[in-house]
Image: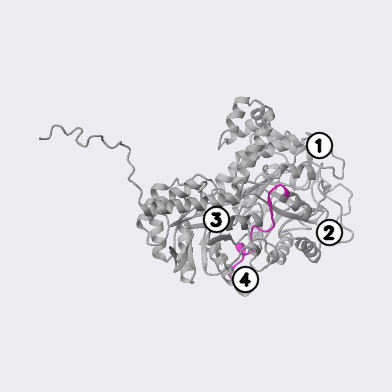
Amino acid sequence: MFTIPEFSALQDAVSRATEAEVLRALHSDRPGLAGLAALLSPAAEPHLAAMAKRSGVITSQRFGRTMQMYAPVYLSSFCANRCAYCGFSADNTIDRRVLTFAEAESEAMILHQRGFSHLLLVSGEAPAKVGVDYLEELALRLRDRFAALSIEVQPLATEEYARLFRAGITSVAVYQETYDRDIYKQVHLAGRKADFDYRLETPARAAAAGMREVGIGALLGLADWRAEGLALGLHLAWLRKHYWRTGLTVSFPRMRPAQGEFKPLAPVSERNLSQMIFALRMFDPDVGLYLSTREEARYRDGMIGLGPTRYSAGSCTAPGGYGLENAGGEQFEVGDNRSLAEVSAAIQKKGFDPVRKDWDAVFQTKEDRQQAA
Amino acid sequence: MLTIAGRKFRSRLFGGTGKFSSPEVMKEALAASGCEMVTVALRRVDLNNPADDIMSVLDRDRYLFLPNTSGARDAGEAIRLARLARASGGGEWLKLEVTPDPRTLLPDPIETFKATEELVREGFKVLPYINADPILALRLQDAGAVAVMPLGSPIGTNQGVLTRFQIEIIIAQAQVPVIVDAGLGAPSHVAEAMEMGADAVLVNTAIAVAGDPVRMARAFAMAVEAGRIAYEAGLGAVSKDAAPSSPEDGLGFLR
C-alpha cells in the first residue's frame, strides 16, 4: 500500500536543495525524486526559464505539438462532506441540484455539439445522490457518443470501479487535496472524506480495477506547494511501479474564489504553479498534465507548449450550467471563460493542434455489444 | 521496388499522422516526404465522420492508409479496433500495435503474436510493430504477417538504431519486408537503417515535431534514398584496423 512520508520531511527535502543539485537535475534525463525535490526548491527559482524550456522540449517530444481538449459536466452539487474550501461543502447554503439522466444527457450533447468528445463527469461526493448505479447508467447512455468518459466523483471500491470501467468509463481522477495530514484534518471537517488514508489509496484501487488512466492532484493553496509537488512525484512513482499498465495524469487545481469565503492557507503564485508543472514534467516525461479553466486565459495561453497536455474550454462548474434553466450553484468561479473555438484558436496560434478525439469507445466495448450494434 | 503483400511502393519512407501542429502542416509534410503509405491511429480519427480533421485532409488515392491500433493493451482490444476499422472502410492493411505500458509504449510480444494469428485468419494484412527480436520476427512471419516492424529505439525517443545488432539478424533472416519503425530521430538514423538493408522505415515524431516539418520530411526522404542506394551499391567492409602498408608485415619469417 502506498504510504506518504511526514509532510515535514518532504518540506525538509525541498527546502535544503542546493543550486548545484538544481543544475544537475536540470541537465539530467532522469532527475529522479532527489532531482524533483531540487527542481521544486527555492534554489530552482532563478532557473525557471531554463526549466520552462526543458519542460517544453520534453512535452513536445513525448506528446507532439498537440493539446487534448475536454470539458466537464457537473452532475450534482450535493455533497456529504464538509470541506472548508469548497463551494459544494455540505454546510454551504447554495441551490443544490442533481441532474436527471435526461438532463445529464442533454448537457453532454450540448458539449458534443460544441465539438467535445472527451468528457469529464464531475459530482459532489454524495453517494446517495450520485452513486455507482447512477454513474453506470449514465456511462452506458453516453459511451457510444463520446470517445472517452472520465469521472471525478467520490472515492469508490475496486469492484465499483471495475463496474464503471465495463460501462465505458475510461479514467478516474481523485485528488488527495493535500498530502499534509494535519492540514487535511483541519480542512476536511466531516464526512467520508475525512479519512486521509482511504482517499490516498483510491488511485491504486482505480488502477487495480483496470482503468486506463488515473489522475492525481493536490488542491493548491492548502499547504506548502513544494512539498505537495514532491508528494505527487512519490505517488506517481509508486503508481508507475505497481500499475505499469495504467496511464497517469496530474492536475493542478489552484484555489479560486468559492462560496464560503475560504482564504487559501498557503497561497500559490503563477510562478510557483509554473515551477511545479515544469518540475513534474521533467520528473515524469510521460505523465498527462491538466491545466483547467480555473486559470486565467493569459496564463493558460502562456503555458501552451511548456508542459500541460490537456486543456478544458468553455467550462461551467454548476450542474445544468450549459443549457438548463435554474442551474445549481457553482463549485468555483472559472478564470478562463473562452469558448472551445476561442481556446482552440489560441492553441493553434502557438503552433499546436487542439485534439478533440484521442481515444475510442471501442477499446472498452464488449464484443457482443459490438456485434449487436 | 519494394513490394509488400503484392503492392508496390516507390518510396521506402512511410509516414505517420500523429503529433503535428495542425492537419495542414501534416498534409504538406507528408507530400514533401514522398511517402505512399501513411499510418493513422484509429483512436485519433473518426472514420465515420467525413469531416474528421485528419481523414479529410488525407488523399486516399495518393496514400495507402495503414490504420494502427495505438492504445491497445492486449490482443482483444487490438482485434476489436481492427474489425471496427475494416467495418468503417479502413481497409485490410493494419499496423498492429499492442502496447500495455503507456509510458514506454514498448510492444507486448505475446499479445502481438496472438493478435497477428487471429487477424491473419480474418484476412487482414498485418504489419506488427515489435521489439527487435529476431525469433519473434520469424514467428510472426510464419504466422502470416506481411512485414515486420522492429523498433530502432523506443517510440518518440529519437535515439536512432539502438537495436542495430538484432535488426541486422532480422534483416538477414526475414523473408518478409523489414520496416524499421520508432525512435528514428534524424535523417542519419534512417540512412543507417537503410544502409543495413532495411526494406523501409517509418518516421513520424521526428518530422512532426521538427522546427520545419516540411523541410525535415524532405531531408528524411533524401536520406532514405541515399541509404538504399548505398546498400544496393554495396558498402565497403568496415574494419577497426588500418590496411597494412606492406601485406607482408610480420611475415618476414616465411621462407
Observer able to see residue A286: no
Query: Residues under labels 1 and 2: Cα distance?
Result: 28 Å
Badge 1: few (under 14), some or many (20 or more) residues near its Cα, within 10 Å? some
Circle 2 SS class: loop
Residue carrying label 3:
B33
Q: Quadrant of residue A84?
A: top right
Q: Which residue lies at the image location 72% right of the left edge and 67% below the top edge?
A: A141
Image marks 4 and 2: residues in contact by CB distance under 8 Å: no
Q: Is residue B8 above or below residue A239?
A: below
Residue B8, percent from left and from top: 46, 66
Q: Which segment did they paint magenta?
A: A349-370
Q: Are marks 1 and 2 on the same chain?
A: yes
Q: Quadrant of the N terminus of chain B?
A: bottom left
Query: Residues under labels 3 and 2: Cα distance?
Result: 49 Å
Badge 3: few (under 14), some or many (20 or more) residues near its Cα, within 10 Å? many
Residue carrying label 4:
A369
Query: Residues under labels 3 and 4: Cα distance?
Result: 41 Å
Residue B137, percent from left and from top: 41, 58
Residue carrying label 2:
A320
Which is nearer the N-term, disc 1 or disc 2?
A: 1
The tag on residue A264 is 1
Which is nearer the N-term, disc 4 or disc 2?
A: 2
Query: Residues under labels 3 and 1: Cα distance?
Result: 53 Å
Circle 1 SS class: loop
- Say which amino acid is labelled 2: Gly
Circle 3 SS class: helix
